[in-house]
Amino acid sequence: MLKMSAIGNLGKDAIINNVNGQSVINFNIAHTHSYTNAQGVKVNETTWISCAYWTQKLRIADYLLKGQQVYVDGIPSIKTYESNGRQSTCFALKVSNITLCGSPKNNESAASNQPAAATQQSTGDITGDVEDLPF
């Protein structure tokens, strides 16, 4: 069995789709790796992963906002597609598990739009009813 895990930030808000009567939450995460090349120049290299989370627990999508850091694991694959006449490839992940890692990075307004349970869950201080959590 091939399995992949990754930590990254969402590039945009998640989208819920319906495929053949089943629900899937689609989102992309990015991870940026910095290094210094042989010429002494700092290089930032970003890897994008296209994620598909097949689940009936759709309320988790309310927490998957642009900038949100998440940990995901699942079964990886490589997709090829054509864009502007060029053949391109990307990582794809059929997500098995997802964990919210913190507040969105993009700005405070996104954090203020996030439901209260997500903020409580990210700090580990859950004071409300656990039955109300979407995951």
Image (cartoon, grey):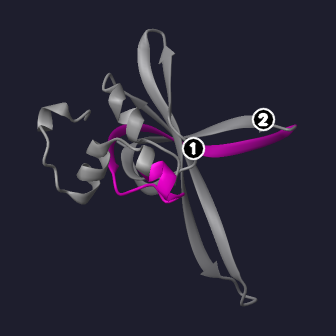
Q: Which mark is residue 65?
A: none
Observer able to see residue 2: no
Horizontal side of 86 relative to 122 (left or right) equals right
Q: Quadrant of the image for the N terminus?
A: top left
In magenta stretch: residue 98: yes
Q: Amino acid at mark 2?
A: Glu
Instruction: Kindly state the secondary structure of the residue where label 2 is placed.
Output: strand
Lower position in the chain sequence, tag 1 or tag 2: 1
Question: Would residue 27 be visible to someone looking at this image?
Answer: yes
* Residue at left offset 40%, top offset 52%: 70
Number of other residues with Cα within 10 Å of mark 2, as a class: few under 14, some 14 to 19, many 20 or more: few
Q: Is residue 45 above or below residue 114?
A: below
- Quarter holding residue 7: bottom left
Magenta residues (range): 85-111
Q: Residue at x 64, y 67 (%)?
A: 45
Query: Is 83 in front, or is 89?
Result: 83
What element does badge 1 sit on?
loop
- Front-most of 107 and 27? 107
Rate crowding at label 1 as few (under 14), some (14 to 19) or many (20 or more) other CA atoms within 10 Å. some
95 left or right of 15 in image: left
Check disc 2 and report the residue beneath it.
82
According to the image, label 1 marks what residue?
12
